[in-house]
């Protein structure tokens, strides 16, 4: 199997595994982002949990664990489709753009010839392409998680969500939040660039001058270190854009504060400057372990497939 296909299959495996394991944390993160009435995140978390328990209880008030699991995994369908396709596309295109960079600088297919800006540009181009192709899936996933299953306007399925959005909002409804998503590509680009550079640094420290860190099998701890550090740095810098994107995606009409800047100003005015970081602790708790899982599965899958 050629390495471009290996990248795609490894990305697909990584996206599937991570989403299946971390979707409940994604549920809480998204609900925290969309909360507008709680004075602080702890209060918001308690409210979200109480709503979850209430919607998962039988008529006699007894908690149904089946309903609880069903509710906390609401939106898992589009999330699995989105994550597996996004990671497969992202790693495939990242490899393609790195190969293009090597072709432009007239070097062999060895990433050690690439500079930090080659990694960054390749990651940006891969991220933009992936965001444009997968944004409709994220809109459906966000709305399915944001609205309780028992709500009368909740989407019954992915197909129902697609039909509802197309009938009521047209094609543009599938691309709500695309602009901040394109800006948010910077996070993934910075993360992936740092990740690859950290791997190269580890290889250099191991006195492996002929290896760029992308073909060498590092230890599990080295992969965890590279992926966690890169994710924490990139997420903390770009998190506000992710929060704004979530707020935009749940809008079903075009109010005056529909665009990014007025919406951001409105949020800060009403909820305070820290509001743009709502859900960050929960998000870090989710994304750092998730990133470690993603890149471990990705790297191990590549080793098996090559």
Image (tube, rainbow, N blue to C red):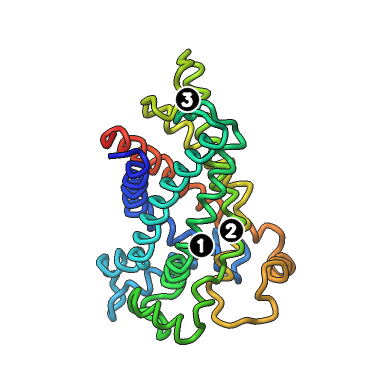
269 to the left or right of 305: right
Secondary structure of the residue carrying tag 3 is loop
Quadrant containing the C terminus is top left
Residue 131 visible in this rendered orientation of the protein: yes
For residue 245, what is the image quadrant?
Answer: bottom right
Q: Is residue 185 above or below residue 52?
A: above
Q: Which of 297 and 43 lies nearest the eye of the viewer?
A: 297
Secondary structure of the residue carrying numbered label 1: helix
Q: Is residue 202 above or below residue 37?
A: above
Tag 1–tag 3 contact (CB < 8 Å): no
CB within 8 Å, label 2 to label 1 = yes
Q: Dot 1 corresponds to which residue?
A: 132
Residue 218 appears in the figure: no
Rendered image: mark on residue 182 = 2
| Pointer 2 local density, CA inside 10 Å: few below 14, some 14–19, many at least 20 | some
Quadrant (top left/top right/bottom left/bottom right) for the N terminus = top left
Counting residues from the start of the chain, the first of labels 2 and 1 encountered is 1
Q: x, y (%) of residue 183?
A: 62, 56
> Which residue appears at 49% of the width and 37% of the height?
228
What's the residue at 33%, 72% (across, down)? 56
Picture layout, residue 23 above or below residue 70: above
Q: Position of residue 80 (x, y in %)?
A: 34, 59
- Residue drawn at 34 percent across, 63 percent down: 76
Element assignment for label 2: helix
Q: Residue at x 51, y 41 (%)?
A: 100
Location of residue 164 in the rendering, given as x and y in whole percent from the top left corner: 42, 83
Q: Quadrant of residue 252?
A: bottom right
From the image, tell me which residue sits under label 3: 212
């Amino acid at each position: 199997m050629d390495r471009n296909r290996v990248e795609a299959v490894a990305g697909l495996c990584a996206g599937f595994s991570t989403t299946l394991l971390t979707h409940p944390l994604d549920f809480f993160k998204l609900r925290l982002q969309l909360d507008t009435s709680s004075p602080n995140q702890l209060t918001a978390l308690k409210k979200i949990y109480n709503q979850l328990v209430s919607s998962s209880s039988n008529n006699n008030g007894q908690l149904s664990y089946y309903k609880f699991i069903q509710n906390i995994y609401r939106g898992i369908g589009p999330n699995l489709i989105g994550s597996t396709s996004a990671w497969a596309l992202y790693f495939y295109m990242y490899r393609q753009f790195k190969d293009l960079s090597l072709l432009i600088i007239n070097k062999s297919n060895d990433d050690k010839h690439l500079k930090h800006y080659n990694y960054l540009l390749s990651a940006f181009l891969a991220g933009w392409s992936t965001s444009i192709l997968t944004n409709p899936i994220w809109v459906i996933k966000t709305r399915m998680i944001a609205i309780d299953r028992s709500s009368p306007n909740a989407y019954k399925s992915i197909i129902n969500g697609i039909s509802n959005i197309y009938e009521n909002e047209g094609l543009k409804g599938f691309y709500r939040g695309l602009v901040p998503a394109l800006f948010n590509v910077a996070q993934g680009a910075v993360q992936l660039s740092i990740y690859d550079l950290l791997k190269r640094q580890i290889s250099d420290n191991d006195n492996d001058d002929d290896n760029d860190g992308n073909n060498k099998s590092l230890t599990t701890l080295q992969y965890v270190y590279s992926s966690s550090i890169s994710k924490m740095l990139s997420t903390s810098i770009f998190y506000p854009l992710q929060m704004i994107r979530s707020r935009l995606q749940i809008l079903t009409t075009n109010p005056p504060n529909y665009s990014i800047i007025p919406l951001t100003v409105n949020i800060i005015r009403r909820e305070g400057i820290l509001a743009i970081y709502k859900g960050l602790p929960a998000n870090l708790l989710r994304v750092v372990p998730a990133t470690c899982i993603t890149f471990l599965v990705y790297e191990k899958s590549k080793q098996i497939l090559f």
